[in-house]
Amino acid sequence: MQTISSIARFERTFAALKYPNYRTWFLGQIVSLFGTWMQVTAQGFLIYELTRSPAYLGYVGFADGIPSWFFMLIGGVMIDRISRRTILIITQSAMLILAFILAGLVFSGIVQPWHILVLAFSLGIVNAFDAPARLALAPELVDREDLTNAIALNGMMFNTGAIVGPAAAGLIYAAVGPAWCFTINGFSFIAVILALWLLKIPNPPKRIVKRSAIVELVEGVRYTAKSERLRTIIAMVGVTGMFGFSFVILLPAWAVGVLGGDATTNGLLNSARGVGALIGALLIASLGRFKYHGKMMTLGTFLFPVSLLIFSFIRQIPPALAALCGAGAALVMVMNMANAILQTHVADELRGRVMSIFSLTYFGLIPVGSLLLGEVAERVSAPVALVVSCLIMLAFFTAVAIFIPSIRRIE
């Protein structure tokens, strides 16, 4: 009886994997994400080694995210017009090329901070089309009743990469240098490109486009703005990105300046956040087709800043890792629930545009937060920058809980 119960629990936790298309996507993406997190971790430490400036870490985050403001909404229109798989094959191929360019610059010994800024900006342009396309692809891979589970497993794969990738990057960086981290990332994109080619998704019916892209873009913005539910959730995601996730760019400076560590410490900090996020994603996936999305998201919006606030006062590595683990779990609760609510409450013909607004709000405000946090850390200190950010998040989420209680009742 216990064995049957365990099997049922396993099947509930990994329900989306029963779909062949989702399995193919899952395997390819998890390999690619391992490489992506290696590059993110190594790139941050490389720029800090070159400049010794927390502000420069903010500049890289800003350069990576600012293209979202110019291209992501247009990307949403494109996603509603043409195959999402085609867009992803193009974007993943572009990311492969950019990774090899960075590796070549480092191997040749000519890499300069401005090279990293330019490549970060270029990657941001690609990501403006890639991020909403990946979000909008999920409903094409699983049935609607398993969509929340697929989103949770997407979070699990993302954060599995966030555990293994940074830890491996720290070790490889210390042993043979950052260029190999970027090289491995370049090769990792082959897995997801192959997976995309293998997906057996029927071609979407051709839309007869009678309106301009601008008109369709405005339609998506109006649709989102008219719904209190959609606009509130997107605002919560924006605040989380600007004042919460943007802190990640300071981890190299935190590892060295606050905790007295090195590249390996930086990798461990990133991995600890990933461990927590993986735990959070597995918890959500194990709940199956549950209905209390709003309550879980609201809980996450308070646990996330509280965990980071605790982290800001810690000066020893082991408890710092534990605090970041908690922050990672809470962040997944916020982002996965927000994603699931939007995906299940948006009209199919507007999905690409709404998810591009979701992506723009998150990825577009992260660079703004990165720039502000980097400057505050440079002029005052990294811990002060983090404390201020946490207090802002707590004030905003408390206001939402008090004045818009309907968010908690979303199923």
Image: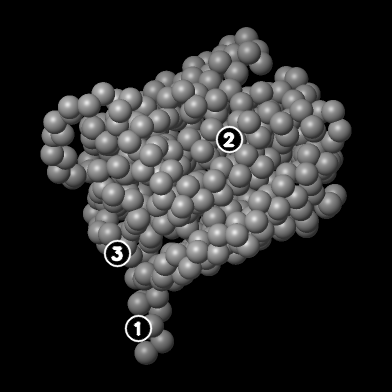
In depth, the one of 131 and 391 nearer the eye is 391
Circle number at residue 4: 1
Q: Nearer the viewer, mark 2 or mark 3?
A: 2
Name the kind of residue labelled 2 in the image: Leu
Name the kind of residue labelled 1 in the image: Ile
Q: Please tell me in which quadrant of the rendered image residue 130 appears.
A: top left
Name the kind of residue labelled 3 in the image: Glu
The residue at which mark 3 appears reads as 145
Residue drawn at (56%, 49%) of the image:
236
Q: Secondary structure at mark 1?
A: helix
Indicate whether 262 appears above or below 115: below
Q: Secondary structure at mark 3?
A: helix
* Quarter of the figure with the C terminus: bottom left
Mark 3 surroundings within 10 Å by alpha-carbon count, few (fewer than 14), some (14 through 19), many (20 or more): few
Percent coordinates x, y for residue 75 in the rendering: 36, 29
The residue at which mark 2 appears reads as 365
| Residue 10 appears in the figure | no
Residue drawn at (83%, 52%) of the image:
314
Residue 285 as seen in the image, left or right of residue 214:
right
**Disc 1 from disc 3: Cα separation:** 23 Å
Number of marks drawn: 3
**Disc 1 from disc 2: Cα separation:** 46 Å
Circle number at residue 82: none
Please report whichever mark, 1 or 3, sits nearer to the chain's N-terminal start.
1
Indicate whether 51 appears above or below 262: above
